Image (cartoon, coloured by chain):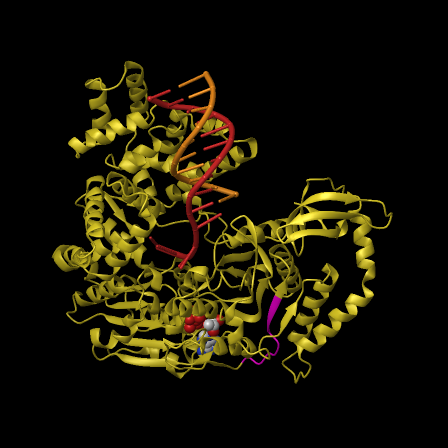
Chain colours: A yellow, B red, C orange
Amino acid sequence: MNTHLERFLHTQLNKPQQQAVTHQDGPLLIIAGAGSGKTRVITARIAYLMHNLKINATSIVALTFTNKAAREMRERITHFIEQGPMPFIGTFHAYCLLMLKKYFHEHPFTIIDSDDQEKIIKQQLEKRNQSKELSARAVVHQLSLLRNKYIGHEQIKHATVGNQVLHELYIAYEKEKKICNYLDFDDLLIKTVQLLKTDSRFQQQVCRQLTHILVDEYQDTNVIQHELIKQLSMHNLTGNQAHVCVVGDEDQSIYSWRGATVTNMQTFTTDFPNTTILKIEQNYRSMESILAVANALIEHNSQRVHKILWSDKKGKNRAINLISGSDYQETDRIVNALKAFKNKYRLSTNAILYRTHTQSRILEEALIKKGVAYRIVGGTQFYERAEIKDLLAYLKLLVNPFDRISFFRVLNTPARGLGPKCEELCKELWGKEPFLTVHELLEKIVVDKLLPNSKLYTIQHFSSFFVNLSGLTPSTVAIETILERTQYIAYIKATYKEENATERIENIKELLSAAKHFENEGHHTITQFLEEIALLNEKITAAKESNDAVLLMTLHAAKGLEFDFVCISGVEEQILPTSRSQHDTEALEEERRLLYVGITRAKEFLILSCAKSRFMFGTPSRQFSSRFFDNIPKELLPSFDSSYWTERQTEQFFNQWFAQATFTESTQKTVISQAAIKNTLNANKTNQNDVKQNSAQAYKTIFKKNQKVRHPIYGIGTIQTVDSSSNLKQYAEVKFFSGVKKIITTFLEPA
DNA sequence: TACTAATTACGGTGG
DNA sequence: GTAATTAGTA
Ligand SMILES: Nc1ncnc2c1ncn2[C@@H]1O[C@H](COP(=O)(O)OP(=O)(O)OP(=O)(O)O)[C@@H](O)[C@H]1O
C-alpha cells in the first residue's frame, strides 16, 4: 500500500473531494469553481483507482481538450505513480488518433491541419468562382462547427440543407479528403465515433478493458466529444457501463467558438442516469483579494448559476490595475515587475497572459532586451514554419502517395521550373483519373510526353528524389536524404538573407533532432515519426522544464494552470473583449469568462495591465481600458497610471508592493494604493537625478532627421527637426500618429 | 513560361 | 509582420 497516497487522501483533500475520489457507484459530475481542486480530484482518483482498487492502467482513460491541460494532469499524476504502466492521459484528439492507429488498418491516412483544410476549400471556391465572395477560413470554421455538432455524415449533410453552397462544399470537401486519404482534426473524433458505433471489432478492441473514464474541463467539450464518452462507456467486457467521472466549471467555458457547449454538463444527468453531482466552492489557489476580483467580475454574466468562491488564503492588496502610456511602456513595466518578483519566485512560476498571439512579439522584444529568460507557449508554431512544412510535405509523400496538398507544395519548392502550368496539367489529369498516385501521375506525364522535353527531365529528376525511400525508412535517413537530393539547404541560403537563412537552417536541425528523439523512443520509421508529430505544435526540447523561464501564453492556453504571479497584458477594448464580440452579448460573456479564467490563474499576485496607445496591425491606435474594469469595484482593484514613472520609480513601486504584500498575513491596515501613491509622488519630486543621468547618457545618442524613434507614451514616430542649441537638453520635433510633438531627446530611443 | 521584386491584403482564441 | 498577389523581366 502506498502510504504517501493514503496520507494524501486523508489530509490533502476536503470532504467532497474525498467523496469524489473514492466514489464507486455510477457516473459522477463534479461542478466546481476555479482553483477548487478539480484537477486534483481527477489525478488523485486515478491514483486511488490504481493503488487501492487495483484497476489496470489500461482500464483507465483521462481526457481533456487542450494539450497544456493534459500535460498538467500527466505531471500531477507522476507525483503518485512513479513507476509502472500509466493510463492514457491526453487530449481527445490524441486518444482518438491512438485508437485509429492501433485498431483501424483499412488504409493509411495523413492528418491535415487547418491550413490544408483551407487549401482544399479555397480550391473548391476557385473552381466555383466564389473565392472572392467567401473566405475559405470562414467556410472551414462553419463546416467544423457542423461536424462537431451533428453525429454522422447523413446528419451533417442534412444540417447543411438550406444552404446550397455550404452543402456542396461539404460534399466536395469530404470527397477530396477521401481521395487523398486525409483525416482532419475533426475527423479523428468523427471517425472514431463512427467506428465505435458500426464496427464491432473496433468497438471491442477499444472498449474491452475500459472501466473508468475521467474528463477534465468538461465545460469545454462539444457534442461529438460527449458522444465519444458515451460510446466509450458502453462496451466494456464487464457488461456494465464504465465509470464516468467528469469535472467542469461553467464559468470557465471559453471554447464555444469551436462548438463546445455547457449543455453537455446540463444534460449529463439525462445521458448518464443515476449521476451523483458534487459541488465544491472553496478555492485553494488564490489569495482572497484576487478571488474577490474574479468573483466581482463573473457576477456580471447573466447566463450562469450563481456561486461565490471563497478562499482561506488571507492576503490583501494582491491585485492591481496598471496603466501605461504605450504598449512599449507596458512591456517595460511588466519586465520590471518580473524582476522585482524574481527574488522570491522562480521565473517559471510567473506568467504573462494575453488575448492574441500577436501580443507576444513586443513582450518578447522587451524580455530579450532586459535579459529575462522566457518561453512562449503556442504561437507561431514550429511545425507551421514554411521550411518545416516543406520538408514534412516531402516526407508525407513517402507515406501517402495520394497526398496532393503535399505534392503541390513541393513540386516547385525549391524552384525547379515546374510552375503553375505544370500544376494545372496535374490537376487536369487528376480530374480525369482521380485515383492515380503522385508517382503514377508523373509517370504518365513523362510517358505521354505531355510537357516539353526539358520539363520531362526535370520531372524525372523530381521523381528520383523518392527512389529507395518509403514510409518504412528511418526518419533521420529520410530527412537527410531528402535534404541532400533536393539541395534544400542551398536553396534556403540562396533565397533568404543571412540571418533569416541561419534561423531556418536551425529549425531544420531542430526537426532532425526531433526525429532522432523519436527514434530513440522506438518510433523509427518516417510513418511513425509523422504520426507522433501530427498533433504536436511545439518543438521537442530535451530538457523542457529545466531552464527556468517566464511563461508567455494566451489566456486560452492558460486554462487549468496556475502561477504565483500572473500579468494579463492588453486588458483593453478591442482586445479583451475582442473587437469581434462588441455587439454580441453571448460572445461578450465568453470574453468575460476568459478574463475570469486569467485572473483565477494567479496564486499570489495579479496585474491587469492596459496601455493608452498600442500598435495594432502596424498602425498606432488610441486604446481604452476594458469595459470589464467597470465590473470590478475600485477598492478591490486599485489603478495606477504609470505613464510618467521613471524606471527607478517603477522598480520602487513593485518592490514596495511586493514587500508590503508579503507580510499581509498579520493585520495589515495600510492599503497599497495610499502607500504606493505616496511613494510615487515622493519619487517624482526627489528623483530629478534620474532624468539628469538619463539625459547625459542619451545625449550621446545622435538623432537625425527622418530617423524612426520610439517614445514611451506616443509610440513610434519620425524625427522632423533636431534642436541641439541648448547645451543641457536636446529637443526634437517628432511626428507621431497623434500629431507632431516637441520632445526632449532623452525620452526617445531609436526604433 | 517562370522567376524576382514590389505591392497589397490581412489579421481570434486550439487540436 | 507575413503571405498572397501582381507587375516586370529573363
Ligand atoms: N483540499 C486541498 N487542500 C489544499 N490544497 C488544495 C486542495 N485541493 C486543491 N488544492 C490546491 O489548489 C490548487 C488548485 O487546484 P486544481 O488545479 O486542482 O483546481 P481546479 O479546480 O482544477 O482549477 P481550475 O478549474 O481553475 O483549473 C492547486 O494548487 C491544488 O494543489
Indicate which quadrant contains ligand 1. bottom left
View extreme (right): residue: A727
Image side of residue A599 versus residue A694, left or right = left
Residue at image point 40% right, 40% down: A515
Residue A386 in picture, x, y percent from top left:
42, 38
Residue at image point 60% right, 49% down: A365
Residue A481 in picture, x, y percent from top left:
38, 28
Decide whether residue A317 is among the magenta residues: yes
Q: Is residue B2 above or below residue A33?
A: above
Image side of residue A79 versus residue A373, left or right = left
Residue A102 in picture, x, y percent from top left:
23, 50
Q: Is residue A670 visible?
A: yes
Magenta stretch prevailing secondary structure: loop
Q: Nearer the viewer, residue A521 or A355?
A: A355
Q: Nearer the viewer, residue A226 or A229?
A: A226
Residue C8 in picture, x, y percent from top left:
47, 23
User: Where's the C terminus of chain A, which quadrant?
Assistant: top right
Residue at image point 18% right, 33% down: A431
Q: Nearer the viewer, residue A258 or A265?
A: A258
Q: Is residue A547 visible?
A: no
Decide whether residue A381 is among the magenta residues: no
Count the labels in the image: 0
View extreme (front): residue: A739
User: Where's the N terminus of chain A, which quadrant?
Assistant: bottom left
The magenta segment is A313-322
Q: Nearer the viewer, residue A306 or A748?
A: A748
Image side of residue A11 versus residue A327, left or right = left
